[in-house]
Image: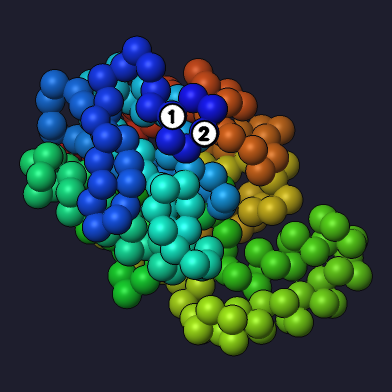
Amino acid sequence: MSNANSIPFGYSVEVVVVDDVHGWYFPAEAHNICILLMHSNRGSKLDMVPRAIFLQGSGYSAFAIDLQAHGETSGEHITFGYLESKSARSATRFLKETKECRKVVALGVSLGGASAILGAEPIDVEGYILESIYSSIETSVENRLDIRLGSVGTLFAPLLYQQVPLRLGIALSELQPTHAVKNISSPALIMNGTDDRRTSIQEATLLFQNITSPKRFTSFKGASHNDLYQFDSIKYETTVLDFLVKMVSVH
């Protein structure tokens, strides 16, 4: 498992390409609930393999994909979840139409979470697990400059995020997960590290407050902007399985 093309050895995995979206499908016997796994910025489907193996072992089929401009999926620019949402929609259709999954849950980390909710509307799934996602493009840029340059860095933030419409042709108003989550109509689980400086716990709280559908919030004490599954796999697995059983299965 050394690169995005390495198929996990020793597990039941199907290589899938749908609408140029490359992915690995980890089948479980039942197709009641299938999980769409979406990686973080500059990651790939390989990063989601541990989650896929855990979910498959728990009886859930999982589909880990390369979002556009990542891994084996083509694309010219990373767009903070906007164009990546098209990859998420293609993958969702594949699970519902080809694999005949009765319910689909999107599990996205950082960029992957934003990809589940941005675009014209959130992708059509029966549940959302959103890990460490930014609240707005402006705040995201400010946070990263603050980490690199200190508080003075935020003064330069507008010089960067104002380039987004010019370079990518995407309005800043299209990169606002805080607003996008208001359109979620299925159960949602928000997870975030308490020490995350890139997507702060305050941002996660705001996202949670703006969701009007059934929802849960879980924080990982001491976690920064790292892999929450690696940080505390036991808490992660318990939280996700409880959400799938008690909130997704009953709706």
User: Mark 2 — residue?
Assistant: 3
Q: Residue at x 59, y 87 (%)?
A: 166
Q: Mark 2 and 1 residues: CB-CB less than 8 Å, in contact?
A: yes
Calculate the distance from the C-alpha at mark 2 to the C-alpha at mark 1.
Answer: 6 Å
Where does the image place residue 8, in percent across and percent down from the top left? 39, 23
Where does the image place residue 210, in percent across and percent down from the top left? 45, 63
Mark 1 element type: loop
Q: Residue at x 26, y 47 (%)?
A: 17
Mark 1 neighbour class, 10 Å CA radius: few under 14, some 14 to 19, many 20 or more: few
**Type of amino acid under label 2:** Asn
Q: Residue at x 90, y 61 (%)?
A: 150
In terms of depth relative to the viewer, which is nearer, 217 or 115?
115
User: Is 174 on the left-hand or right-hand side of 103?
Assistant: right
Q: Quadrant of residue 82?
A: bottom left
Mark 2 neighbour class, 10 Å CA radius: few under 14, some 14 to 19, many 20 or more: few
**Type of amino acid under label 1:** Ser
User: What's the image's color scheme?
Assistant: rainbow
Mark 2 element type: loop
Q: Quadrant of residue 15?
A: top left
Check residue 61 in the rendering and tell me which mark sits there, or answer none: none
Q: Is 131 situated above or below 55?
A: below
In terms of depth relative to the viewer, which is nearer, 65 or 51?
65
Check residue 6 in the rendering and tell me which mark sits there, or answer none: 1
* Count of marks overlaid on the render: 2
Where does the image place residue 233, in percent across and percent down from the top left? 52, 21
Q: Does the rendering let one see residue 117? A: no
